[in-house]
Amino acid sequence: MTITTDQSTVVIDALRAVLGADYVVSDRAGLGVYELDASDEAITGIHRPLAAVLPETTEEVAEVARIAAEHDLPLLARGSGTGLAGGAIATQGGVMVVTTRMNRIVEVNLIDRYAVVQPGVVNLDLSTHLAPQGFYYAPDPSSQRACSIGGNLGNNSGGPHCLKYGVTNNHVLGLEVVLPGGEVCRFGGPSAENPGHDLTGLIVGSEATLGIITSATVRILPLPEEKGVLLATFESMETASRAVSATIADGILPSALEMMDKVTISAIEAGIGAGYPRDAEAVLLVELDGPTQTVGEERERVAEILSEHGAMTLSVAETAEEAELLWWGRKAAFGAMGRLAPNYHLTDTVVPRSKLPEAMQLVAEVASDYDLIIANVFHAGDGNLHPLILFDRKEPGIMERVLDASSVLMQHCIDLGGAISGEHGIGIEKNDALTLMYSDIDFGEMARVKRALDPRDLANPGKVFPSNFDRFGEPLD
Amino acid sequence: MSTTTTQPRRGFSGPDQPPEDVMRACVHCGFCLPVCPTYRETHRERSSPRGRIWLIKAVSEGELDISDPVFKSEMSLCLNCRACEAVCPSGVQYGELVESARAQIVQHEPQPASARAAKAVGMKLLLGSPRATRAASYGAKVYAKSGLGSAVGATGLMSKIGLGHAEALRPAMQDEFLVAGRESWPAIGSRRGTVALLAGCVMSTAFAEVHRATARVLARNGFDVVVPPNQGCCGALSVHAGEADHGRALAKRNIDALGGPEFDAIIVNAAGCGAAMKEYDFLLREDPAYADKAATFVERVKDASEFLAEAGLVETPGALPITATYQDACHLAHAQRITKQPRELLRAIPELDLVEMSESDLCCGSAGIYNLLQTEMAGQLRERKVDHATATGAAVIVSANPGCMLQMRAGLAARGSDVQVEHLMTILDRAYAQVEQETPGA
Ligand SMILES: Cc1cc2nc3c(=O)[nH]c(=O)nc-3n(C[C@H](O)[C@H](O)[C@H](O)COP(=O)(O)OP(=O)(O)OC[C@H]3O[C@@H](n4cnc5c(N)ncnc54)[C@H](O)[C@@H]3O)c2cc1C
Ligand code: SF4
Ligand code: SF4
């Protein structure tokens, strides 16, 4: 998108008239910081919006959308910028709506069990707010301390506890959305059943390519009476994978079941020191929740199964603090990779649980074929792998090797009957890889939906759709 | 001017360049955003740790000029509270980045010589020599007693260094200063060791009684306590302000004065000083004569609460039937990662009811001389802190840092609140005094 200096002055003035100068960022340094989200710049490239705006209300977002549309400028949303696929990066310039000031918890209804929040509310802040009343918001991406509910909705995020409770879209009842032209729509609502087309479901996971969410009605749950956390070590990732399948096959549904390898443990211990055993080749972190008695019984049963399936050591978190520290270690794992290498590329593939042992073997093979270090830390319970390829982008020729290894990994996972992304979104990192999963016909249909809501392709353009498709989703030859 | 072997990079040059490996360890995951006070207040990425690291990197890579106004203003708006460091999964030593960036700004400043000199004179007057601080403090005390109190605040020492609005934060001067080399406390009961107490600059005057309380508590727990002569200010404020050379001179003096093998530990009861002293190794990393000495020195620096909790209390303190809440000083909780020990010590006092406030470890806005320079942000954070503290209903707010104590006292006074703010060691000392009353002659 090219725009003249005159035009940009007009746009910035118009935005200032709506929001005030303080909340329209257009200077070089102030905008520069919005170049990044948590994805790797070696892959996403460096891009800057024309302006970043920080509105506080739906009406302000709608006004901003109208201004962008009037000037034919792209419009995208950014929550906390913890996304790992570059979804919140302004690859085509335009106006970036930063939702950090839209951080109000508007309503909490304990009887009907829902909360209405603005999109900038930080995931964990909602649960912290609800805790004194004995409630919480279940989807818990590992980034939950920082990421926004709007970003969670944009990416349909998952998290460790989604094994038992389901990902974000299972917890959304209704949305308020500003469409690219500035119209404000409301889909769904607090009641459990909503008639008509499920447009809420359509918006969740669309990564701001259909519009900007300005309010969400989400389900809230009572806190479980008891939680039990177990840590088991294994001699290899394959043995640990078999133990995962055996646990689930037994009929027990842990609230979380996470696996980590030796590389990951060394990163966590170097970064924050959470007390994971450094000498273990693989660990499983298992959490059970529910009524106290059930948790006690299940914990014993799980311990039995894990021992039968090769666990070398088993320990139980004795106190809530101990459990919390183990979880903090797990949740900090991606960030801790910075201790080992300045860059990492993360593939977020999914395989059927039964194929985990094979998948682990394939990851190890790719690592040795391409002479790369690959760390594994993932939601084992639902087969959502996160192989992290560690590298230093200053090393000549490295990018090619990383990207090749990454596509081979994705292909392997698809061959095993899986998918290329579990929860982190497609953005501009995985869009081309989407062709491994969908046909031209599939993309054509998605494009028709997009065009219906966003006829001028202004909403977060260039995201999700593969780069060999034009801006209306038609394949380029 | 010291020399350096570091290659100049595009934006930075000379000594004290932000370490490249620290910058590169940031994977921009964003985990640090929610704990950053300035981000929480402004919601702007540039005022977040991740944003500031981007700015430092941009200057380093020549993308931004070192005189860029946003870069400079963000480096000053940062409280250096280190909350970001404590949660960073990648272990990014943010404090080293911001302090070096500030040192670079100072070095590159085509500052009017007068402004620079005034600042330096003020800093030196206030911090460099305990004698100067004492003299200034003494002057302030005499004036205060003569009824000219606020006039002194506005026109005296503070205004000399361009900080006229600092009156509200001016500590009440205590009657007896603590002079290094003059006082010592022998261990009571069986002797467990000898420790050196840092007198500091502001602490030795305005908080002399806190020192005495600290010494009595340590002595009561079997330690000989001495306040070795020739020590001085820890240098924290100089380093935070980018005056690294001045900070180094102060650090060396303290290493010489306090680093002797006769001391089992160097005890500090001001969080900001302790944090700075534990970083002498980084500050003196490029100094061939002191780098090794600094490395062994830092291992013996202990916050009073850290030391006591580790050594264990010999005797249970007496009962204090009060409701108290504990405020985590940034430089204790984040820079030194000490949060449990002070609470353990408070819980060891019978009948003391400890209630937690929310956001206990979010900066109160004091941050060294920050509250004198960034009044608006400091004021917002102060109000936030006082709101949380008073919401607990506690009669006493306990802290382990003089800056936080002054900041909160000023906030409470402005509201006409009668909630007290006390140092952790003062509370422990009071509790021990109860034992004496209960068992005379003990
Ligand atoms: C260390 C680490 C661990 C992580 N762990 C997990 C995990 O366990 N599970 C998981 O799913 N993800 C995880 N992530 C990825 C990321 O945190 C999530 O995708 C999160 O939901 C992003 O939220 P955000 O507020 O940062 O969104 P952003 O990065 O700001 O945006 C993400 C996408 O959502 C869109 N968006 C933002 N706000 C809105 C809005 N109001 N309306 C419409 N679209 C919007 C953006 O345009 C963008 O496409 C992790 C990331 C990190 C760095
Ligand atoms: S938490 Fe650490 S790695 Fe993550 S953005 Fe902040 S400083 Fe960088
Ligand atoms: S030191 Fe404190 S104010 Fe500065 S960036 Fe870190 S958290 Fe924010």
Image (spheres, rainbow, N blue to C red):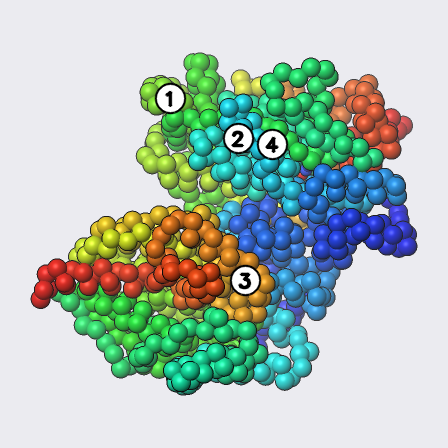
CB of mark 1 near ligand 1 (< 8 Å): no
Marks 4 and 3 in Cβ contact (< 8 Å): no
Circle 2 packing at 10 Å, graded few (<14), some (14-19), many (20+), is many
**Closer to the observer: label 3 or label 2?**
3
Query: What distance separates the C-alpha of mark 3 from that of mark 2?
Result: 33 Å
Same chain shared by disc 1 and disc 3: no
The secondary element bearing badge 4 is classed as strand
Q: Which residue is mark 3?
A: B378
Marks 1 and 3 in Cβ contact (< 8 Å): no
Tell me what residue is drawn at x 69 percent, y 78 percent: B110
Query: What distance separates the C-alpha of mark 4 from that of mark 3?
Result: 32 Å
Query: What distance separates the C-alpha of mark 1 from that of mark 4?
Result: 28 Å
Q: Which residue is mark 2?
A: A137
Along the line of sight, the residue nearer the viewer: B122 or A467: B122
Chain ID of residue with mark 4: A
Q: Is residue B432 above or below residue B226?
A: above
Query: What distance separates the C-alpha of mark 4 from that of mark 2?
Result: 12 Å
Q: Which residue is mark 1?
A: A291
Q: Mark 4: which amino acid?
A: Val
For residue A168, say whether it is visible.
no
The secondary element bearing badge 2 is classed as loop
Residue B291 image position (x, y, % from top left) = 44, 71
Residue B294 image position (x, y, % from top left) = 41, 70
Q: Which residue is mark 4?
A: A116
Same chain shared by disc 1 and disc 2: yes
Chain ID of residue with mark 3: B
Marks 1 and 2 in Cβ contact (< 8 Å): no
